[in-house]
Amino acid sequence: MNKLFALLLTTGLSAPVMLYAQQEAIDTAMVNRIREEGLNHSQIPVIAHHLTDEAGPRLTNSPGFHRAATYVVQALQGWGLSGAQAEPWGEFGYGWSAEKTSLSMRTPYYSPLIAYATPWSGSTHGPVSASVYLVEKMDSAWITSHLAEMKGKILVIQPQDTTLPANFKPDATRYTDSALAAIGDTYMFTKEMLKMYLPYILKNMMLGKMLSASGAVAILHASAHRDGTVLAQTMSGWRVKDQPAAPDLQVAREDLLRLMRLVHGGVPVTLELQSDTKLYGQHLQGSNVVGEIPGTDPTLKSEVVMLGGHLDSWTAGTGATDNGAGCIVALEAMRILKTLGIQPKRTIRIALWDGEEEGLYGSFHYIRNHFGDPADMKLKPEQSRISAYYNLDNGSGKIRGIFAQGNEQAAAIFKQWFVPFHDLGAATVTLRNTGSTDHLSFDAIGIPGFQFIQDQLDYETRTHHTNEDNYDHLQMDDLRQAATILASFVYFTAMRPQMMPRKPLPKPEKFIFDDIFP
Amino acid sequence: MNKLFALLLTTGLSAPVMLYAQQEAIDTAMVNRIREEGLNHSQIPVIAHHLTDEAGPRLTNSPGFHRAATYVVQALQGWGLSGAQAEPWGEFGYGWSAEKTSLSMRTPYYSPLIAYATPWSGSTHGPVSASVYLVEKMDSAWITSHLAEMKGKILVIQPQDTTLPANFKPDATRYTDSALAAIGDTYMFTKEMLKMYLPYILKNMMLGKMLSASGAVAILHASAHRDGTVLAQTMSGWRVKDQPAAPDLQVAREDLLRLMRLVHGGVPVTLELQSDTKLYGQHLQGSNVVGEIPGTDPTLKSEVVMLGGHLDSWTAGTGATDNGAGCIVALEAMRILKTLGIQPKRTIRIALWDGEEEGLYGSFHYIRNHFGDPADMKLKPEQSRISAYYNLDNGSGKIRGIFAQGNEQAAAIFKQWFVPFHDLGAATVTLRNTGSTDHLSFDAIGIPGFQFIQDQLDYETRTHHTNEDNYDHLQMDDLRQAATILASFVYFTAMRPQMMPRKPLPKPEKFIFDDIFP
């Protein structure tokens, strides 16, 4: 899930869902078959192993992404889907991978430190040793007046908060009924918030460039999180104009704070660092991965139900929960439906997106290529034939409901569709919005795009964009439940007489991407 | 805190504490002065920084231990204590340190892995690359039949439990009133338990030796714990006859499970490993660190009140909570009392122990050198002059009460002594026993030895023997409270008319150490 770039209009209504829609016909026999296949004959662990352990980190346009895309195409073909392929969407930028990462304290005594190279950061080209220089203030005046001292040093950025209060909250949680009833907008990042944060972000990028240009050997940041869990993400680096970049690493918070305290105590600290990294510039184009179960109704087969998640990830882990989980669930939903030999009226299309973490690039360019540009709202014919898009990108937690994104008629339908899954804990339909992921691209072009409500588990505390985003943090029972419900919703959408009801077309508005950053 | 070797007799009574003891005189003015100094003029963070960040890991007989011991002697001298010195207690064995630790997956793709060298493990003498061989069963027949395949490989020991359920419990907790009221024996490891576990431990040591002798390059274990927290400890290695040993590392659980799954999936895995380690054999003698505030009463000054914790630690962290915390609190208690210029009737002696983690060696040999051997109970004169020993070794949590270890008369006294500290959350006196640390050595020779009840915080979940046992996981307010109460208890003990009441002398019984292991 991407946090920063979810900027689209939010037209959430807080009114309760009105059940004025007509009665939905539920095919109970098919629901039972989907449940049997999804809950008792799941292939989730196998798919998960291929997408995480075997593919490795799936950074956009990088070798791990390509390994995963190859696996997905082969899996879809193996299940008998049509048109399984990587579909280029336009220019993204460099791929990147860590080739060797090792950080140790050498003086005053030896200690290995936990560190991960920041994606798209530069290479040390082999091992280097240097003393630590503590950047006490991320402030242009302070940096300018100390710049001469930084040359040849490893810079340690002192975090603003240097304490670590005891953690009395559980890492993993599930929604209580009352929390579900009171659920509000989540993960929204509005234009107003951007206006507030952008100067801060731009200032930090500018300060980062000053430090990079100081002649320092490398820059070390204290990761958010604790206990050996390390967050590693970035807001730039992939564009050709962002390179070359300095070596830059995210260090386990406690490890970095020790370096800071030693320097404060007057103890000289030297480090041994190897951060070999590699850029991939041979093809700068990004690709989404798509595949279909063709519709069978002569009239309706040109209409399409879509489902997906984003295939790209960050690099410290293997992107198991962000957003391996969404891809695994969407793939398993397709496998279930194909295995059951369904004959959907409408075409069902899976799309696993590229470049989500850097700005919803893959899904946005997909809608621009296929449906039209939100900036002018000149719609292409295909826009009118997409019934709905279902997304899952809040980690490994089971489905507890769905965000109807202000679409009251869709909400009334979803209420009925959840009835066969109340026993699995899924019932809540809210008109509220959730942001920061790929359904927003559809919403922006007037196509109903939805994201499910999922139990949080340890997504925010441990896995989101961290080294712990790995297979072990997937909860297989939760994913089985999610795939079962997703397959059913997709089937219902493919079979109902009408397309899903739409909200009024949004006003033309630019979808903001990398042009916000210099 | 040591878990395995706490083998002494446990004579715990579960009867409620009877208040038949005489009224204790509480010097309220002195309590207020101690509280003011301990709570509002604390030096805890400074002491903690020196013992953890600056000294580094304090493995028995290793450079970090010696750095810490030097600091402690200087600090005690600086505060004006008498006789501050390292006091040799007998032969321990080798010191050891990690000199370079770096582990990465190289095939099927590059990934850095979190790993810590097991204390006293052998050296790779520089970087090595080798393919992974998965040891699927820790079973002598299985190992024998696969031994030939292990040569030149890096062995990955498959753990018995390969799942990682979501963690819905908080890492840190405090005692509730009802939990305190119901507190039972804690950390006890009885002779009966040893009898049960010893065959299992010996079998694993034997299997470990088989693997070491296989010609494998190194042995990798899945750490207990999760999320980047890595436990690293051992039961052997320091004795001259234990060496040479194979390179052996504790790997973050999720990192190791990925290697295991890749091998299970038929993917060849190669690793790049450097685990340079160093043995220190110049002096095999261990030392405790002691210092005193001499008593001033002509009659009572030959009597002694003792307090302490163990100075040694494991090596993946800096031993902040195990047992930096106990040492810091004991040191701060001495500083408080010296700063206040108290004139105690009895002598107050701090002793920071060595070799606790390997078997309570430092404290046991101290009591054997000074007071007598529990094996024959032939007492030396000094035994009769130690009023009590107070220990703190359950992490960084504040004091909530004390284990009276079956000493009913002492319990009645402690009840009264806690009255001025009820507002700080400390009141519980239980006759129950706690084990696994150095007060047991005193109890074994008939000297009242006590350990406080402390809030657990994240001791069991994150810091105990792990890479996260660092300064940041110390809760300074808790330690301030503990030092204030410890200083007061020590003062009360030094000033009361009589020595602390004793339990009947235990029957002669051998204190079991390394002679249990071949």
Image: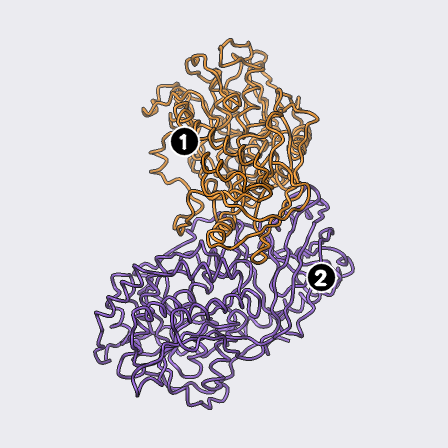
Chain colours: A orange, B purple
A225 vs A42, left or right, is left
Report the front residue among A194 and A488.
A194
In-image side of B167 versus A43 (left or right):
left
Which quarter of the rendering shows the C terminus of chain B? Answer: bottom right
Residue B216 in view in this figure: yes
Pinpoint the chain carrying mark 2.
Answer: B
* Image quarter of residue B78: bottom left
> Mark 1 packing: few (<14 Cα in 10 Å), some, or many (20+)?
few
Q: Label 1 marks which chain's residue?
A: A
Answer few, some or many: residues within 10 Å of disc 2's Cα (few below 14, many 20 plus, some between 14 and 19): few
Q: Position of residue B288 (x, y in %)?
A: 49, 74
Q: Are marks 1 and 2 on the same chain?
A: no
CA–CA distance in space, label 1 to label 2: 52 Å
Question: Is A223 placed left or right of B381 in the picture?
Answer: right
Using the image as rendered, state which of residue B274 and residue A141 is in the foreground.
A141
Name the spot of residue B328 as percent of width and height, x first.
41, 64
Image x and y of residue B50, in percent: 46, 61
Residue A403 in view in this figure: no
A76 to the left or right of A223:
right
Q: Are marks 1 and 2 in contact (CB under 8 Å)?
A: no
- Looking at the image, which residue sits at the far right? B148
x then y, percent, for residue B500: 32, 81
Amino acid type of the residue tagged 1 in the rendering: Thr
Q: Amino acid at mark 2?
A: Trp
The answer to whether residue B160 is above or below residue A508 is below
- Please tell me whether residue B79 is drawn above or below residue A412 in the rendered image: below
From the viewer's perspective, is residue B303 above or below residue B36?
Answer: below
* Closer mark to the observer between disc 1 and disc 2: 1
Task: Find residue B142 and name its label.
Answer: 2
Secondary structure beneath dot 1 equals loop
- Give the residue displayed 70% in from the left and 50% down from the top: B272
Q: Where does label 1 land, which residue?
A: A186
